[in-house]
Amino acid sequence: MKRLRESFDSRGFVFLGVTDLDVASDHARFLAWLDAGNHAGMEFLVRNAGLRRDAHNILPDAESAVVFGLPYAPPDAEAKAVRPGIAKYARLRDYHKVMWEEGEAAFQEAVPDAAISRRVCVDSAPVLERALAAKTGAGFIGKNTCFIAGKLGSFLLLGVVLTALKIQETRPAPLEKSRRNANDCGSCQRCQTHCPTGALDVAWNLDSRKCLSYWTIEHRGVIPEEFWPWLGKYWYGCDICQDVCPYNRSGGRLSRTDLMRSLESIPLRQVATMDQGLYEKLFGGTAMTRARKSGLRRNALIAMAVTGDPALDGILGTILNDAGDDDTVVKETARQVWRFTQDRKRRR
Ligand code: B12
């Protein structure tokens, strides 16, 4: 464990925990969450729902899960100076690639024996990452459903190495059980009351149908107008339920400043009208490609509308009249935005 800790720590993964693979009760919770429709349009979660029950589906001879975490809250000065409207995790280079490569390297350094099988997962395989993280005993699931690593807070990206090596768990089983049932949020409900769309009305349950993160990242069609007002604050992802969490007041700050990318220079006007070349230049190699060019253009248009961006008038006509632009979602959003701005003018 000491070697693992040193190896992961030296790469900025200040969170590390080890657990067995029993996530049966979490999986039942996961299925109930799906049954109630909380996944909205994320059908990929339904397709491989069964696989998440047992990590042996991913690595047949797995014995342990090593959970590692990268803190990503921006340094204080940067957090105050830059308000790019982009969720904090996406202000870095794509964490999937970085964590996958460096997680692999860290594990390899600590466990060089190639005969011991291992598989690194960073959203790349159907495993219950948060459930495994909580099982390590080094943190808990908050009412906002995020994994909160105690003093490190929840601005922490998670990766898991499944390995055939049996490693001593970071928390012995009996203590683990009693701690997991503990409610470390106490009576605090800040995430629930501050979520502007009611996605956390039920504690420990996120309803993606109301979550701004879902609408701005995962959803592929137009965004219902009831959610628009908040895209003025975050137009890609949303951190509100974490921003208000007391555990994040002095939580772990980004340990790998080399992963930060510059965001100040991306005007929404450019995002709303970007072609493939500009899209790749601005967002290639970042996690924001998850929303695709279409989703980012859609979000930028809405953010411009709700913030009353003066550049909007000049670009709506261009988008609607560009016969070479066949993005139906962007065109429909542009029509909605036009109606929205006309209504606003009329009301004044
Ligand atoms: C689908 C998904 C989403 C969806 C749904 C989120 C959700 N809350 O379920 C959407 C698009 C909304 C989303 C948003 C975000 N996501 Co996301 N997402 C995922 C993904 C791919 C699957 C999560 C999932 O299965 N959800 C279904 C629910 C039921 O499962 P769960 O949240 O994992 O909860 C399990 C356990 O925690 C446990 N459990 C839950 N509650 C409780 C309560 C108690 C008392 C107990 C004992 C157990 C328990 O049981 C659950 C079922 O197994 C994971 C990666 C992965 N492979 O796990 C990332 C992941 C959860 N996301 C992550 C991040 C960073 C985000 C955002 C912060 C991004 C942003 N800024 O916009 C937001 C946070 C919103 C929020 N409050 O959750 C991180 C979270 C890290 C952390 N510290 O928790 C993950 C782990 C990715 C990663 N590799 O780091 N995400």
Image (spheres, rainbow, N blue to C red):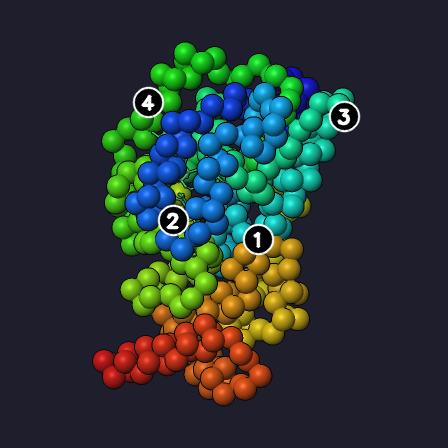
Sequence-earlier tag: 3 or 2: 2
Q: Residue at x 51, y 75 (%)?
A: 327
Q: Label 4, on which residue?
A: 182
Which numbered disc, 3 or 4, marks the residue closer to the eye? Answer: 3
Q: Amino acid at mark 2?
A: His
Q: Amino acid at mark 3?
A: Ala
Which numbered disc, 2 or 1, marks the residue closer to the eye? Answer: 2
Mark pair 3, 2: CA separation: 38 Å
Sequence-earlier tag: 1 or 4: 4
Q: Amino acid at mark 4?
A: Ala
Which numbered disc, 3 or 1, marks the residue closer to the eye? Answer: 3
Q: Amino acid at mark 1?
A: Ala
Image quarter of the C terminus = bottom left
Q: Is residue 77 above or below residue 24?
A: below
Residue 241 seen anywhere in this rendered image of the structure: yes
Quadrant of res 261:
bottom right
- The x, y position of residue 258, in whole percent, is 66, 46
- The x, y position of residue 248, in whole percent, is 42, 37
Q: Label 1, on which residue?
A: 287
Q: Is residue 285 above or below residue 205?
A: below
Which element is circle 3 on?
A: loop
Which numbered disc, 4 or 2, marks the residue closer to the eye? Answer: 2
The response on whether ligand 1 sits within 8 Å of label 2 is: yes
Q: Label 3, on which residue?
A: 114
Q: Residue at x 51, y 24 (%)?
A: 21
Sequence-earlier tag: 3 or 1: 3
